Every structure is written in C-alpha cells, then in structure tokens.
C-alpha cells in the first residue's frame, strides 16, 4: 500500500467510524444512563431507514422526510418507554436482554407486513450528489463527507447537552442514583423517557442518513447491532466521547483489516475489544 | 392474558383439526408438495416469488399436478443452514410430502439435499446455485430448475474476454456461492486470454465496500467482475458509481446484481451489463403470457425467481403426468422429467445428465427499470457437472 | 416446586421419555431428541446464570466448538470412534471455556455479558471467515461416530432409536453431575457467590478460581450438548455459534426459571413447542414468537417453574 492509498483508506476508516458512532451514541446513552441493555437498538436503525424511504416516497423530498422522521422517532421512543421499558428498570439485565430480543422479532415482522421484503433505494439528495475527484480514477462522494460532518456536530452537541445543560446535569445525577434524584423532587421518569426517546431518535437518524448510501433492506438492523455494542463497551458504557474514540478505532481496524488480512477481517473487531477490555476492564473512558 | 392464551390454543387445535381432516379425506387424491423456502429475513421476497410462480403454474393447470389436486406443506427455512436438516425432516418425515421444493440459500439447499437423499425423496431446487448440487452431490432424485453458479459466470468470462478486457479484478462475498461464481468466470476469461489481477473477498453479508473500491482504483484494472445479490448488491452498485469508478472502470456481474435491485440502485444501475438465464423483453408467446398472468394474479412484475418456481411446478407436472399421478412409479417419473423439454418463460430447456437445466445464458443491460436482453452469448449451455456420477 | 413433588415428578418424566419412542412417530422422536439436547445445553448454562450468577451471553461458542470438533475429527469416508470423538469434543469445549474464562471473569455485570458475547463472536468469525471448518457454508459429518470397542459394539448410533436412548442417558448423566456438583461444598460456594461475592471473598474463598471452575464445567457440559447435536443433525455451521443461539438458550433458562435444573429442561421443551406451534400456525411466526417472549417477560417473572407456587398462592388467596 503506497502512502496515497493509505491516506484514502484512512479517510474511508474515518468516515465509517463516524457513522458507527452515530448509531452507537444512542445506545451508549440508554445503556449508560438508564442501565438498559437494548438489543432492539439495531431495529431502530432499520426503522429509521424505512421511515426515510416511506416518507421520501410520500413527500418527494429527503430533507422533509428527515424533518418529519425525527419527531416521529422521538414519539415512538417515548411511547415504547412508557409501555414497555418503564417496567424494566427494576428487573435484571437478563430480562431486558430477553424483552428486547423479542422486540427485534416483532419489529422485523411488522416491517415485513407493512412494507414488504424488497430492497429499496433512496437517491442521494441533489445538492450533495456530486463527488470530489481524488485521482484520475477515484473520487469521493460529497454525501459521505456530509454525513461525517453531521456526526461530528452531533457528537459535540451531545457532549454539550450532557455536560453543560441543566437537563444533562439531571441525567448524569439520575444515572448515578435514581432514588436520590427522585427525592430531590426531580421527575426521574420524565428524564428517562426523554433519554430513551433521544436514543431511539439517534439510531433512527443514523438509519435515515445512511439510507441513501446503504439502501434499505430487511435485516439491516442486525448488521449494526453487535458492532454498536462493541463500540459502547470499548468506549466505556455511557460515555459519548468514549463511543466516539471506540467507533474510530473500530473504523480503522475494520477498514485496514479488510485490505491487509481479509481472512480475519470479521475477527479483528472483536479482538480489539478483548484487548481493550483486558487493558481497561470498564472501557477506555469510564461513565461520566 | 388468559383469554388470549385460550384463543391461541383454540387456533392451534382448529388448525390441527383442519389439517388432520384434510389429510384423512384426501389422502388418496391430493399430491403433497412441500415448499421449504425463506419467508422471513433477507431472502423473503425471493421465497415469495418462487411460491407465487409455483402456484401460478398449478392454477394455470386447473389447480392440479399430474391430474391430482395439490396440497401444500409450507416451512419457512429462514435461510438458516443450522435449521435446514430439521426443517427438511419436518416435511419429509412428518408430512410425508411427495416432492420437496427448495430453496434459495445454497447452504440450506445442500443440507436439504442430504436429508432428501437419505430418505429417497424427490427434490426440486428452484434457486440455490451451488455447483455441488448437480456436481459431486448429484442424485437421481434431485432436479434443479434454476442454474448452477458456473453457468452465468462462465458466460460472463467469455463476454468480457471478447470485449478485449485483459486485466480484471474480482470481488465477492466469501462463501461458496461467490467462490464458484468467480471460478466459473475465471475459467472462461482466462481461456479467452484474460488475466485476473486480484481476487478480493469480504465476509458475508458485510456491506462496507469503500476499502475495496480504493484498492480497485489503485490497481487500475480494465474491468471489474463481481458477484453480489440483494441489499448488498444495491449498495455495491451505488458505492461503485459514487466513487466515480463506473465511468472509468466498467463493472460486470452475474445477473443477481441487478435482479430485484434496480429501483434501489437508481441511477447507478443504468447501463450495467450482467449475464443470467432470464431477462426482460424476451419476446416469446410463452414469456408474454406468463408475465401477463403473473401481473394479474399477484399485482407485481415477475422476476427470475418466479420463473424458476413456475418451472419447478412444470417439471414435476411432466413427471407426474407421465405416471398418471402414481408417485410410486418413481423411476418412470424421473425418466419422464429427464427427457422432458420444459417450455419455460426463459425459453425452452432440457435437463442435463446431472439434472441441471441446459439453457441459454443472456447478456442483459439495465435500461430504465428493466434488465433488457441484448445478446445470447451462450446457447444451450450445459454445466460441466464435475464430479457427478449419474 | 418443593423437593418431595420433584422426587415424585422426575421418575414419571423419565418414564415418559423412555416410553416415548413406542408411541411417537420417527419425526417426533427426533424432535424430542433435539429438545433433550437443547435441555442439556440449557442446564449447562443454568449452572452459570442460575446458580453462580454469571450471565453468559456467549454460551453457544462452547456448544459450537464441540460440534466442530466432531466434524473435524470425523474422517471423510469413515466414522470416528465414539470413545475418541466424545471426550475430544468435551475437552475442546471445556478448554475453550477455561481459556476464555481466564479473560472474561475479570469483568462483572453488564461488562461480563458483553465480553462473553465478544469472545463468542470471535469464535463465530473464526469459523465463519476462515477455512478452518468449511467457512460460512458449514461442513457435513458423513458418518455418525462408531461405538465399537475392540470390535464389539454395545450400541449403534445410526439407529435413531438407540441414538435417542443415548441422548436420554446423556441427559440423565449431565443432570446427575450437576446435582452432585451443586450439593458438594464447591456448589455451595458457587451459590454463595451468586448471593454475595464480597462476603465469600471476605470469608477467604478465592472466588475467581471457583468461578473459573464453574465456567469451565459449564463449557464442557455445553460441549456434551454440542457433540450430541452434531451427531444428531450430521451438519455443522457457524450459525450454531451465533449470538442468536446464545440468546435462545438464555431464553430457555429464563423461561424455565433460573436456578432450577428441571426448569431448564422445561424451558427447552417450551421453547421448541412454541417454535413448532407458531411455525405451523402462521407464516409470520416470528411475530407470534416475539409477542410471546415480551408477554413472558412482562407477565411471567420467575419463569415456568414459578407457576406452581403462583398457582398455590392464587388458590389459597394469598397476596403477593
């Protein structure tokens, strides 16, 4: 690999890592703050992508679809929390694993009943449809760079929300001691509902943004689920910065693994996780 | 909770009773067809198309096969090889089907064929292209109405060599299907004087293609040959175009790249060249009638999978008709299928010694929303059936 | 379930299992055999989840490793010897559990769940992406192991009936081993770890080594199940090690009620029954399955084995 290819591959790794971060960010919030293991997180990514497809077909405009999709995802998340997850806080992780495993099956089948099993595509929005030439044969799609930019903005925004706002303070306090926050007269249930809705919306947004480049197809959620968990755990459960760092590590490991060691590409990601956890059993950055 | 449970139990009991009654009353007349296909997961739409195609032939044939009414036993194979043996046994041992039809996923089909062989059950494969099924694992009781991986990819190797491409890079998922497609392609391409610079693979069903596109750009081949299907295929074609490679390095593939995925690919699909045993705009009376009927019955356009399901029913009907519906005359039934000329929407085909279709392979170009047939590079192409002792 | 009723019910269940082949058709005999294999698998996990308090989300790895061991040890054109294949499969699974346990047992809680998953995924991709065992296409086992000792064959696993009884015997053996272990001082330490590991530590027990021993034993027993599965189905694929499989076996344990060996067996039967019933009922059986799982979590805490106690409470009119 010459230096120029190395640079382009690094760009690929960076862009892939940032997209992974967007998917995993919602998971790390729900996981870290509410202590819920949510296996259905990948389904929210899938739902986001299908939402983008359905709404783009309805409205004819991808941006309108996203603007409509985000509040829908938030409402969906809040409703799910109220109906199901609110019953799970006092249960152990096992039952959470089980319930959300059941939800995966339900979401996939409902999707199949409502929208069928065909592969769908969404065109990249016109203004981002161009590509930037890198050399005489290869160019880089602008839309991928746009996604990366959105991911960076969201990372900063999330960090600000949690570290610098009053809501963030309550969230942080709630993740440490639920009962204490409650006794201070703060409505912890509402905070949890907000966090969960936010987590669902982030995953759905990732699905919506990825839809134009990844297509929309059955089972797309399960492709990102496990990798998201790996990122969350490597980064340190509940840490937004940690998830960002972990997502970039995974992006690089996966991209260069595929090129240099094709037979072990799938394995490398988990090897990285094992090594990191042996070095720091609670992830790179601890919760906080 | 109590009421729903009760209701559910009643459903199951009713269903069981209905099945039991049906079994008793018509045990003499109805022929039992076992459909083991994917109805959930990535390949669900393919399983449904095959089922539709099969049922369409039966209804065109007056609701009968070989003069007998048809009873279906359906199992969702989930494209999960780990459950394949058990699912196949369900149809063969529990339901005692007369013919086992399935499936899409090659790994599942291989496991099914093993159970079918052990129980000497007649089996018809309506999609899975694994070369082994009509190669080393061929069997008197096993027929295939689709293709072998080797067929379309071999034809593509010939096409690309004839176009004057000398240096090519291949890319596919790392599983037997992809490997066999690349092998078939290489065989013809190298025979035609071409050279494969590099074979690249990524784990199935991974769809992060960007690193490979960068590699391709660095290697600067004359052309690229790939094997992908379904959601991954759509994503690949889009990524390839977005990376600017579509204009500088032509992309070729086995037909599955653009079957059922053109809408999802959008602009990126236009002009792609692929090879397959079926295509749009095949202007024959049979194909036109088939497409019209299918569109009427299912409110959807048929695809290659529907054709393969349709032909599975046709082939079985030929055999069953020859023995007047008497499935116990297995040898004669098989003999009739072996010598039959199947009037398929893809064009007539016969079965090879190994029971794989001897068929035309078409070169298709994506124009609008169609895989337009533009040439027939291989007429009556037979799979070499390496390792088959039939 | 109290001990006396268990003492009554168990022989009855065993008798039913032994008599089943005389009534059930071939297909159902095989289905029950498969369910018994899953029951062994579930019991082995229950040792960790229910008795030691270690929620492993990667138990399918050891099941799969044993199955692959059978595939690798069986020559292409000959059967392997049972007396070689069975110990090899168990040792392979136990060894893998020992090595992985050295790493994963350093973590706790949520991290333990995730790290066991990560290691299982590593093993999954090892078999899935490399050519070690046929890659993602899996590998056939053409011959079932041969039970002959120096020319004399006490039984023949190619006979479905004899294979069935072999599996029943394995189930009884694994149940017996687990019962003995749990009654031993070692087992009591494990149960102590579940309720309060810190206390056990301060009492002077090196809990890490106890947990490692339990993890290894559970892996080896999962290996028994994996061996039987490979022999029964004759086909091994990476999906046997996939996280869904780890999820399914957890589901069986929870369905049956954790920390109850008979419950784990019941869970395996309930799981298979649900799959069969929903599969026969509707094409969208996964929807029904998903709804059933959600309902079970919400309305059936404690699993199936808690039902008798709940019924009793309901009948005597006691409040919760």
Image (spheres, coloured by chain):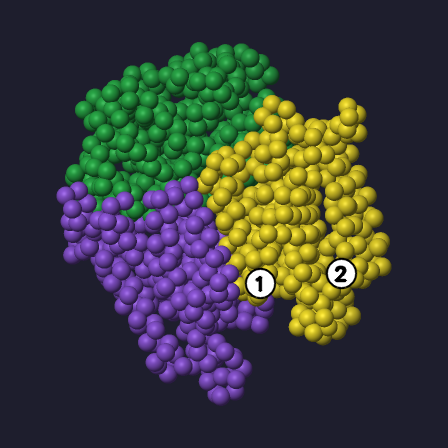
Chain colours: A purple, B green, C yellow
**In the rendered structure, the residue with mark 1 lies on which chain?**
C
Residue B71 to residue A89: above or below: above
The residue lying at 43 percent from left, 81 percent from top is: A170
Outermost residue, bottom side? A184
Q: Can you say which quadrant of the picture contains the N terminus of chain B?
A: bottom right
Closer to us: C269 or B97: C269
Q: Is B269 positioned to the left or the right of C277 in the image?
A: left
Helix, strand or loop under label 2: helix
Residue B155 at least partly seen: no
Residue B297 at least partly seen: yes
Q: Is C79 positioned to the left or the right of C150 in the image?
A: left
Mark 2 is surrounded, within 10 Å at the Cα level, by few (under 14), some (14 to 19) or many (20 or more) other residues, namely some
Residue C59 to residue B147: above or below: below
Residue B23, image x and y in percent? 62, 31
Residue B176, image x and y in percent? 43, 32
Residue C111, image x and y in percent? 53, 63
Q: Which residue is mark 1?
A: C106
Q: Which residue is mark 2?
A: C186
Q: CA distance from mark 2 to mark 1?
A: 20 Å
The residue lying at 33 percent from left, 57 percent from top is: A17
Among the 4 quarters of the image, the one containing residue C76: top right
Closer to us: A70 or B8: A70
Q: Earlier in the sequence, mark 2 or mark 1?
A: 1
């Amino acid at each position: 690999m010459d230096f120029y290819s190395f640079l382009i591959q690094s760009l690929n790794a960076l862009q892939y890592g940032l997209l992974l971060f967007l998917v995993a960010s919602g998971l790390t919030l729900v996981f870290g703050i509410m202590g819920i293991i949510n296996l259905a997180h990948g389904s929210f990514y899938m739902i986001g992508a299908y939402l983008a497809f359905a709404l783009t077909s309805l409205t004819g405009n991808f941006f309108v679809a996203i603007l409509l999709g985000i509040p829908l995802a938030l409402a969906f998340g809040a409703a799910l929390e109220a109906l199901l997850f609110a019953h799970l806080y006092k249960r152990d992780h096992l039952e959470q694993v089980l319930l959300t495993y059941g939800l995966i099956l339900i979401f996939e089948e409902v999707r199949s009943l409502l929208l069928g099993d065909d592969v769908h595509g969404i065109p990249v929005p016109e203004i981002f449809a161009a590509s930037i030439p890198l050399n005489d044969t290869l160019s880089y799609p602008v839309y991928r760079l746009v996604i990366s930019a959105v991911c960076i903005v969201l990372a900063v925004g999330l960090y600000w929300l949690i570290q610098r706002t009053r809501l963030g303070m309550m969230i942080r306090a709630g993740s440490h001691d639920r009962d204490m926050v409650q006794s201070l007269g703060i409505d912890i249930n509402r905070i949890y509902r907000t966090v969960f809705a936010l987590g669902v919306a982030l995953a759905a947004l990732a699905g919506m943004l990825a839809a134009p480049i990844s297509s929309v197809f059955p089972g797309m959620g399960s492709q990102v689920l496990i990798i998201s968990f790996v990122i969350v755990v490597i980064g340190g459960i509940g840490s937004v910065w940690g998830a960002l760092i972990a997502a970039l590590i995974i992006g690089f490991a996966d991209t260069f693994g595929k090129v240099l060691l094709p037979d072990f590409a799938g394995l490398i990601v988990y090897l990285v996780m094992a090594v990191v956890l042996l070095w720091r059993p609670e992830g790179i950055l601890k919760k906080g | 909770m109590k009421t729903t449970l009760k209701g559910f139990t009643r459903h199951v009991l009713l269903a069981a009773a209905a099945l039991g009654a049906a079994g008793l009353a018509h045990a003499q007349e109805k022929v039992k067809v076992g459909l083991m296909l994917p109805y959930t997961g990535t390949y669900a739409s393919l399983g449904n198309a095959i089922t539709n195609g099969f049922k369409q032939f039966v209804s065109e044939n007056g609701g009968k096969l070989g003069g007998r009414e048809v009873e279906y036993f359906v199992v969702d194979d989930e494209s999960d090889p780990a459950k394949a043996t058990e699912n196949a046994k369900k149809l063969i041992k529990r339901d005692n089907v007369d013919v086992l039809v399935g499936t899409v996923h090659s790994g599942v089909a291989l496991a099914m064929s093993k159970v079918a062989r052990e129980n000497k059950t007649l089996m018809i494969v309506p999609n899975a292209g694994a070369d082994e099924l009509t190669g080393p694992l061929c069997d008197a009781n096993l027929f295939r109405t689709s293709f072998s991986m080797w067929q379309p990819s071999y034809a593509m190797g010939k096409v690309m060599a004839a176009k004057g491409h000398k240096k090519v890079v291949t890319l596919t998922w790392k599983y037997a299907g992809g490997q066999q497609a690349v092998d078939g392609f290489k065989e013809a391409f190298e025979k035609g004087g071409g050279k494969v610079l590099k074979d690249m693979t990524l784990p199935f069903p991974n769809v992060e293609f960007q690193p490979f596109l960068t590699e391709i750009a660095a290697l600067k081949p004359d052309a690229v040959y790939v094997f992908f299907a379904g959601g991954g295929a759509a994503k690949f074609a889009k990524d390839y175009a977005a990376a600017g490679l579509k204009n500088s390095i032509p992309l070729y593939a086995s037909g599955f790249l653009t079957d059922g995925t053109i809408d999802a690919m959008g602009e990126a699909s236009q002009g792609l060249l692929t090879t397959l045993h079926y295509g749009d705009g095949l202007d024959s009376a049979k194909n036109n009638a088939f497409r019209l009927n299918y569109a009427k019955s299912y409110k959807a356009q048929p695809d290659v999978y529907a054709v393969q399901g349709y032909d599975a029913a046709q082939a079985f009907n030929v055999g069953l008709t020859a023995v007047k519906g008497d499935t116990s005359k297995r040898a004669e039934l098989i003999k009739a299928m072996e010598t039959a000329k199947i009037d398929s929407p893809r064009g007539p085909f016969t079965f090879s010694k190994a029971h794989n279709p001897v068929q035309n392979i078409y070169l298709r170009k994506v124009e609008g929303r169609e895989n337009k047939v533009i040439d027939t590079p291989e007429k009556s192409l037979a799979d070499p059936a390496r390792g088959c002792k039939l | 379930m109290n001990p006396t009723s268990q003492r009554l019910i168990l022989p009855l269940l065993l008798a039913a299992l032994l008599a089943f082949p005389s009534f059930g058709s071939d297909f159902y005999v095989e289905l029950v055999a498969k369910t018994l294999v899953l029951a062994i698998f579930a019991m082995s996990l229950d040792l960790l989840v229910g008795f030691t308090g270690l929620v492993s989300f990667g138990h399918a790895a050891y099941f799969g490793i044993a199955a692959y061991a059978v595939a690798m040890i069986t020559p292409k054109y000959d059967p392997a010897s049972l007396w070689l294949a069975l110990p090899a499969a168990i040792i392979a699974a136990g060894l893998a559990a020992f090595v992985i346990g050295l790493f994963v047992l350093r973590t706790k809680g949520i991290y333990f769940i995730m790290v066991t998953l990560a290691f299982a995924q590593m093993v999954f991709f090892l078999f899935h992406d490399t050519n070690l065992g046929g890659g993602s296409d899996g590998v056939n086992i053409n011959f079932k192991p041969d039970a002959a000792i120096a020319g004399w064959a006490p039984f023949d696993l190619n006979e479905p009936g004899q294979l069935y009884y072999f599996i029943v015997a394995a189930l009884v053996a694994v149940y017996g081993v687990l019962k003995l272990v749990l009654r031993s001082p070692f087992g009591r330490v494990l149960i102590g770890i579940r309720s309060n590991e810190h206390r056990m530590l301060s009492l002077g027990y090196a809990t890490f080594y106890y947990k490692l021993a339990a993890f290894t034993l559970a892996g080896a027993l999962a290996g028994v199940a994996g061996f039987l599965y490979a022999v029964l189905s004759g086909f091994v694929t990476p999906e046997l090690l996939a996280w869904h499989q780890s999820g399914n076996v957890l589901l069986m344990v929870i369905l049956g009620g954790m920390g109850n060996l008979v419950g784990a067996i019941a869970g395996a039967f309930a799981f298979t029954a649900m799959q069969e019933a929903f599969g026969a009922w509707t094409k969208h059986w996964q929807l029904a399955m998903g709804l059933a799982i959600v309902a079970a979590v919400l309305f059936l805490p404690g699993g199936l084995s808690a039902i008798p106690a709940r019924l009793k409470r309901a009948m005597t009119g006691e409040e919760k």
